[in-house]
């Protein structure tokens, strides 16, 4: 008796003569380059993207550049208007509220999970980054301070060892990173941020789940207010 069980795959006699799908890396690379310029503060909110300059620097035509513009607009980083080109999207106060509501929840949860899951080696690495960050504060190196600040937050999220949480957090990474390069905060605000990070490290070293979750949420609420205050200046 013949075996009539359906087997997976396309039957050879009906298989179309398709060529392999090859997805070129160029559009993704252009997106990555422009995203990096935004995240590094070289293209500031409200600034227009210099199309000719970018095409010359990257050695590309305008077609992949405009494909990249569409992708970055969909990600909420650019605004594209007909005949006016692309500009870096400005952050609005309500967007800041929405972003930080999510971040408070994500980082608070990450801190609680990290207290039970972070390895001694990972904890030592975060402690080393914290030491370098505080050295930047003492030397008044604001850029270095906030770069290390962001890396510490990312390490805590990674130490939570929850891939779903990390994936959602990474989805906000472009918006999070470009906040670093808004106009400079005051000396008093910077001192508060440094003091809050001292408390974060103390709670993490003690593996105090409840304390770290609460401190991270309060830290992000305070940061939200500082960012919004900068936007209205």
Image (cartoon, helix red, strand yellow):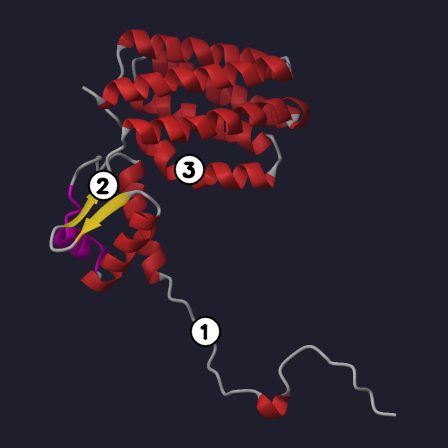
Bounds of the magenta span? Answer: 48-59
The residue drawn where x is 15% and y is 53% is 51
- Distance, label 2 to label 3, CA atoms, is 16 Å
Does residue 131 appear in this view? no
Q: Is residue 169 magenta?
A: no
Give the SS element for disc 2. strand
Label 1 or label 2, whichever comes before in sequence order: 1
Using residue 6 as the reference point, say whether residue 192 is left or right of it.
Answer: left
- Between 46 and 59, which is closer to the camera in this rendering? 46
Residue drawn at (22%, 37%) of the image: 42
Classed neighbour count for the residue bearing mark 1: other residues with Cα under 10 Å, few (<14), some (14–19), many (≥20): few
Residue placed under numbered mark 2 in the picture: 88
Whether tag 2 and tag 3 are in contact, CB under 8 A, the answer is no
The front one of 146 and 7 is 7
Q: Which residue is mark 1?
A: 21
Q: Quarter of the image holding residue 141?
A: top left
Image height check: is 229 above or below 56? above
Q: Is residue 13 left or right of residue 44?
A: right
**In this rendering, the label closer to the viewer, 3 or 1:** 3
Main SS class of the magenta portion in the image:
helix
Distance from disc 1 to disc 2, alpha carbons, whole Å, reads 33 Å
Helix, strand or loop at mark 3: loop
Q: Secondary structure at mark 1?
A: loop
Q: Quadrant of the N terminus?
A: bottom right
Mark yes or no: residue 172 visible.
Answer: yes
Q: Position of residue 73 (x, y in %)?
A: 29, 48
Q: Which residue is mark 3?
A: 172
Residue 65 image label: none
Q: Which of 222/20 is in front?
A: 222
Residue at 52%, 87% (x, y): give it.
16
């Amino acid at each position: 008796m013949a075996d009539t069980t359906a087997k997976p795959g396309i039957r050879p006699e009906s298989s179309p003569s398709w060529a392999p799908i090859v997805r070129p890396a160029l559009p993704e690379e252009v997106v990555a380059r422009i995203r990096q310029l935004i995240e590094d503060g070289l293209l500031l909110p409200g600034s227009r993207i210099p199309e000719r300059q970018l095409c010359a620097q990257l050695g590309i035509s305008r077609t992949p550049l405009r494909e990249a513009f569409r992708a970055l607009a969909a990600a909420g980083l650019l605004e594209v208007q007909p005949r006016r080109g692309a500009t870096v999207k400005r952050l609005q106060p309500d967007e800041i509220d929405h972003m930080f509501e999510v971040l408070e929840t994500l980082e608070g949860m990450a801190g609680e999970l990290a207290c039970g899951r972070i390895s001694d080696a990972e904890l030592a690495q975060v402690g080393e980054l914290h030491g370098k960050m505080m050295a930047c504060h003492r030397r008044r190196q604001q850029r270095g301070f906030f770069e290390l600040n962001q890396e510490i937050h990312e390490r805590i999220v990674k130490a939570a060892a929850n891939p779903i949480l990390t994936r959602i957090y990474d989805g906000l990474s472009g918006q999070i990173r470009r906040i670093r390069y808004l106009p400079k905060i005051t000396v008093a605000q910077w001192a508060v941020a440094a003091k809050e990070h001292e408390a974060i490290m103390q709670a993490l070293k003690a593996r105090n789940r409840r304390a770290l979750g609460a401190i991270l949420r309060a830290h992000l609420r305070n940061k939200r207010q500082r960012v919004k205050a900068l936007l209205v200046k």
